[in-house]
Amino acid sequence: MTLTRRTFVAGTLAVAGAGALAGSAAQSMRQRTVRRWAEAFGRIDMIRDLGVEYATRYPDDASESAVLDHLATLAPLLPGRDDESGRRPRLRERLRRDFAEGDMVAIGGWRFSRTELRLCTLVAQQWNHAHGVAGVFARATLATAAREDASVFWTAPSASVRVVPAAAGWECRMRAGGPSGQRVTLRVAGRIIDEFDVAAGVWQRVRYPIRGGGAAPFDLELSTVPTWTPAGDFRTLGVGLDRISFVTPSQNG
């Protein structure tokens, strides 16, 4: 993935999303407005990936609560479906103000307004919630893989995936990126449950039993070292997954 057009993100974010509500003095109402607006952009891979990358680099600034607090003031500026309110120029003006004040972040050789990167982060968060993941980039295609193995979901250095528990356990396939292997640490509720090496260039199956997992889904946390960045890309990547939600061996056949 290469970032070829700097104006793509700013222009897209200033285009109408889902119908935005009128501004409200209530913080919660403004946050709901921004959430609803962000949901419309989850299908745009570059916007989601920029959001994940920003959260990777600035985790304290990119938590959901921090992002919503920062962006709630944008609610009256977000364009509606037909932009009848003329809000689009006002949103662009807000982004230009960030540049004028030096509130910028360099990613992939381009400089972005911190406001637009926070908007990208919110878009990624909305998509992540819908799919039970965090810190996972958009689906990518492996150029040299067999057709049935062509897709991969690269993680950020830290990520999590929602696991549906079952007596048999859970499984997925992983692969390392870059020229060498990587070390993956798995945690549940902050507790390390395993560490293992993943080889570069090949898929390997990872399967574990669940002990005392109960009936409720839980988050499996993955951290990967070393990280890597493909040539011409802006993302800081961890390990590759063949799916973004784990299934049990009984479901996988």
Image (tube, rainbow, N blue to C red):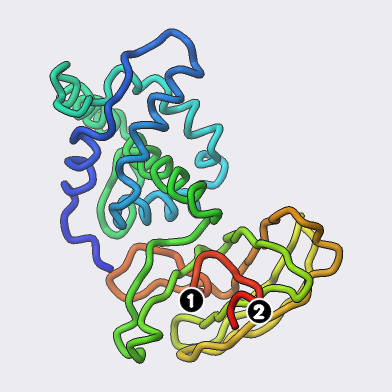
Residue 126 in the figure: left or right of residue 250: left
Residue 159 in the figure: left or right of residue 151: right
**Residue identified by numbered label 2:** 249
- What residue is at 16 percent from the left and 16 percent from the top? 85
Q: Is residue 94 above or below residue 138?
A: above
Which of the two residues, 162 or 196, is positioned nearer the viewer here? 162
The amino acid on which the numbered mark 2 sits, given as a three-letter code, is: Pro
**Residue identified by numbered label 1:** 242
- What residue is at 28 percent from the left and 68 percent from the top? 1
Residue 30 spot, x, y in % from top left: 42, 19
Which of the two residues, 213 or 26, is positioned nearer the viewer here? 213
Residue 128 spot, x, y in % from top left: 48, 51
The residue carrying pointer 2 sits among few (fewer than 14), some (14 to 19) or many (20 or more) residues within 10 Å by Cα, namely some
The mark nearer the N terminus, 2 or 1, is 1
As drawn, the residue found furthest toward the right would be 212
- Disc tally is 2
Which of the two residues, 41 or 229, is positioned nearer the viewer here? 41
| Element marked by disc 2 | helix
Q: Is residue 221 above or below residue 54?
A: below
- What residue is at 69 percent from the left and 82 percent from the top? 196
Front tag of 2 and 1:
2
Q: Are marks 2 and 1 in contact (CB under 8 Å)?
A: no
- What residue is at 66 percent from the left and 78 percent from the top? 250
| Element marked by disc 1 | loop
Residue 151 spot, x, y in % from top left: 38, 77
Q: Is residue 80 above or below residue 221?
A: above
**Residue 73 marker:** none
For the residues labelled 2 and 1, the Cα–Cα distance comes to 15 Å
The amino acid on which the numbered mark 1 sits, given as a three-letter code, is: Asp
Q: Quadrant of the C terminus?
A: bottom right
Residue 225 in the figure: left or right of residue 54: right
**Residue 169 lies in quadrant:** bottom right
